[in-house]
Amino acid sequence: MNKLLKNKTIFISGASRGIGRSIALRAAMDGANIVIAAKTAEPHPALPGTVYTVAKEVEAMGGKALPIIVDVRNEQSIEDAVNKTIEEFGGLDILINNASAISLTKTENTPSKRFDLMFDINVRGSYLCSKVCIPHLKKSQNPHILSLSPPLNLQAKWFAEHTPYTMSKFAMSMLIMGLAEELKDAGISANALWPKTIIATSALKIAKPGFDELARTPEIMSDAAYEIITSPRGNITGRFYLDEEILRERGVSDFSAYLVTPGIEPMIDLFVEP
């Protein structure tokens, strides 16, 4: 197996569980250096995973791990984490903006604190992580920024039931659109990735309890992310990929292995046309 990420350093926000953890473990198989940047230092009573448990998993898979407690809403916290990354690994090759907050509620039912949380983590967090990492990414031989955000499909139906959340996720995608143009001459690829179907994560348990059997596993997202971040610099940028789309481009046609429940058709995710 070609280990395209061997010795590459990847900073992943929100990597203590779910898709972020899955991406970390996939990259660890190549022998990558993984910065597990998240707020979870102690186990949550209902949600498994901390930066330290994922670090052990990364090392067991053959990667090197640097677990750091990071609040992506705080610029100083991000700067300190990136400085530790450079001290530990000597550089930075890939940023994955995975940290996200969700509330599938209409405007009148969304408390201002929840609105602020979604914008602080989804938008401000992705912006600050990108801003702080860019000077270091410019020194990499194959730098990438990847955000887990949806295609910019601005239809009213995506706003009808959860305007605040939709605004925050589309703003993440707008950031990618801007970064792809800003960083083109620097050779930094900036892309977005979104699941075609719902994914069995802790976020799904909170947003749609009981829907796990209609989901795919996080591994489809980590395999898709791997295909993007191992692409040669400048080869793809400014793209808004669905997980299934990029995997089909790379020759995958059978997605049954990713089903949580074999034989059950998975549910299409938000922001995706049937």
Image (cartoon, grey):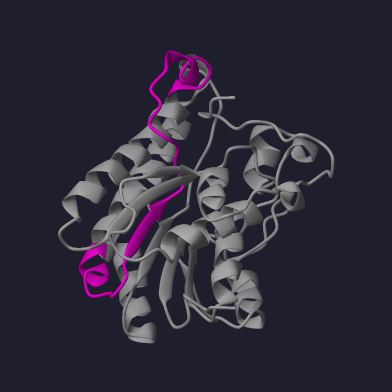
Q: Residue 234: image x %, image y %?
A: 28, 59
Rendered residue at 53%/56% (across/down): 250
Q: How many marks?
A: 0
Of 73 and 190, nearer the camera is 190
20 or 77: which is nearer to us? 20
User: Relative to 192, is 226 on the left or the right?
Assistant: right
The x and y percentages for residue 77 are 35, 63
Rendered residue at 44%/33% (across/down): 113
Q: Residue at x 28, y 42 (%)?
A: 177
User: Is 170 situated left or right of 186 in this image?
Assistant: right
Task: Note whether residue 70 is visible.
Answer: no
Find residue 9 and report its image quarter: bottom left
Residue 194 vertical placement versus 53 (above, below)? above
Residue 94: % across, % down: 38, 66
Q: Quadrant of the N terminus?
A: bottom right
Residue 5 located within the stretch drawn in magenta: no
Dominant secondary structure of the residues highlighted in magenta in the image = loop
Q: Is residue 209 visible?
A: yes
Q: Indicate the quadrant containing the C terminus: top left, top right, bottom left or bottom right.
A: top right
Magenta part of the chain: 134-163
Compare residues 262 and 81 and report the one nearer the observer: 262
| Left or right of 171 on screen, residue 272 | right
Image position of 146 with respect to 135: above or below = above
Q: Tell me which residue sits at (50%, 22%) in the image.
A: 162
